[in-house]
Image: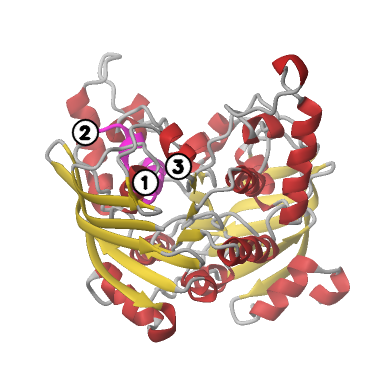
Amino acid sequence: MLQLNDVSKSFGPVVALRSVNLEAHAGSIHALVGENGAGKSTLVKIVAGVHRRDGGDFVLDGQPQDFGSTAESKTAGVAVIYQEPTLFPDLSVTENIFMGRQILGRGRRIDKAAMYAEAERLFAGLGVHIDPRRPALGLSIADQQIIEIAKAISLDAKVLIMDEPTAALSGVEVERLFTVARQLRDEGRAVVFISHRFDEVFALCDTVTVMRDGSYIATRPIAETRIGEIVNLMVGREVADLFPKQETEVGDVVLDVAGLTSPGVFHDVSFSVRRGEIVGLAGLVGAGRSEIARAVFGVDRYAAGTVTMKGRPVPTASPHAAIRSGMAFIPEDRRQQGLVTDGSVAENIAAVIRQHLTKGGLLTRAAENKAVTPWASRLEVKTSSLDAPARTMSGGNQQKVVIAKWLASEPDLLIIDEPTRGIDVGTKSEVHRLLSELAGQGMAILMISSELPEVLGMADRVLVVCEGRLTAELSRDEATPERVMHAATASQEMAS
């Protein structure tokens, strides 16, 4: 159904793709894997009509193609769900699904009733309930991904490309997506599935293609390969322990949260984080973990309770006060909340410390570059230049820029929400090692993650959130998958 042979693409002096091959057959699910910066997104954008290839062959359903726009790609039967949601926040859920192809009724007027009904049918088919009339503004990442999936399914595409669609979904939602993907496969469509989660690749896909540094490396039947082989092909080296947690000396309390309450969101939340300690905040998507973190950092207001840093109260609803107290916050949605995507890499990394770099009220580019270069180097940010716009970088490198920005402020407490969402296995290991090193240097870390192995592998203590309440506090030795999931999904009785 989809065939790419010896496809190449360059952006000026930067070679993004060289001699890449990919075949996706009707009635199959084909995995595409590789580290961030391997060229997966560029390849997808060629199929989607965002970029034109420089060389090679592109055949779709037996016909040579050279799409000049995304509209041509969609018309030919290609649907892409990108890693980051691309919804219009001020439009309704239904308007986002049918953007540019509204259902028309009498007098060629937009038939909103028919569109609402079709949106409800799509959501019913996915097994979810989202009000088709509500604005997209304020929806969780999980709901935004579901809407993107519904939009793609509504296109009745021959080829469906899913770029990290499960990155922010709960286990139940992932299984629901897998059911839909298998239905699409059984209907004779070709599905290309991009993921850094090997359990998903091996559970869902029939074949896997590996890319590295813009090049095609290998294609393997899933049934005839193993995770270790795929990892070695991806990174071209042996990857060290994915969770390189080092023993640290736990010191004084840095963050103390007492009785934090926001009606309808979370209730009576109390916990502390000490120097040298990584505290994992676990729970299902929608449990209230991110909302607690946002309230602690002052992004959202809370009705009752206190937040104290190093013994001093932190005013509510004031991120500036939180930063002055020694906090740093890396949000889940890096593109919308963590980056100025039109700004340069240097401008983004220097965002929090910029006031300290000025002389006589002036900030020079040289001073900015001098300050950010060590952090870009330490996190191995891959970019053609520190002056390059952040939007041109891969998702993993954007995450590194956000981390570098906050580490440059030298905080006492780092709150990091989904630290490895959308990041490849090699970069995951690097981020985990960095977190472990920071804890070893005395930093207090509050880590929110939907990946249970990450929580169990990195946390010294695990706090479990269920429906806005803390239902368990487990030491590293006490934390098991069963105990965490019981606390995350059930009553206090099960948590005990």
Question: Which residue carries the number 3 mark?
Answer: 76
Q: Residue at x 80, y 38 (%)?
A: 117
Q: Is residue 133 visible?
A: no
Residues rendered magenta in the picture: 386-407
25 versus 229 height, above or below: above
Left or right position of 264 against 245: right
Q: Is residue 388 magenta?
A: yes
Camera-nearest residue between 352 and 388: 388
Is 316 on the left-hand or right-hand side of 466? left
Q: Nearer the viewer, mark 1 or mark 2?
A: 1
Q: From this viewpoint, which residue is outermost toward the bottom?
A: 224
The first of marks 3 and 2 along the sequence is: 3
Across and down, in percent, residue 120 comes to 78, 43
Left or right: residue 228 versus residue 157 is left
User: Which of marks 1 and 3 precedes in the sequence?
Assistant: 1
> Which residue: 58% across, 34% down?
87
Q: Nearer the viewer, mark 3 or mark 2?
A: 3
Other-residue count near label 2 (Cα within 10 Å), few / some / many at <14 / 14–19 / ≥20? some
Q: In percent of the image, x 46 and y 58: which residue is there?
A: 420
User: Which residue does the image show at 66% across and 43% down from the upper left?
Assistant: 140
**Residue 329 versus residue 223: which sits nearer the camera?**
223
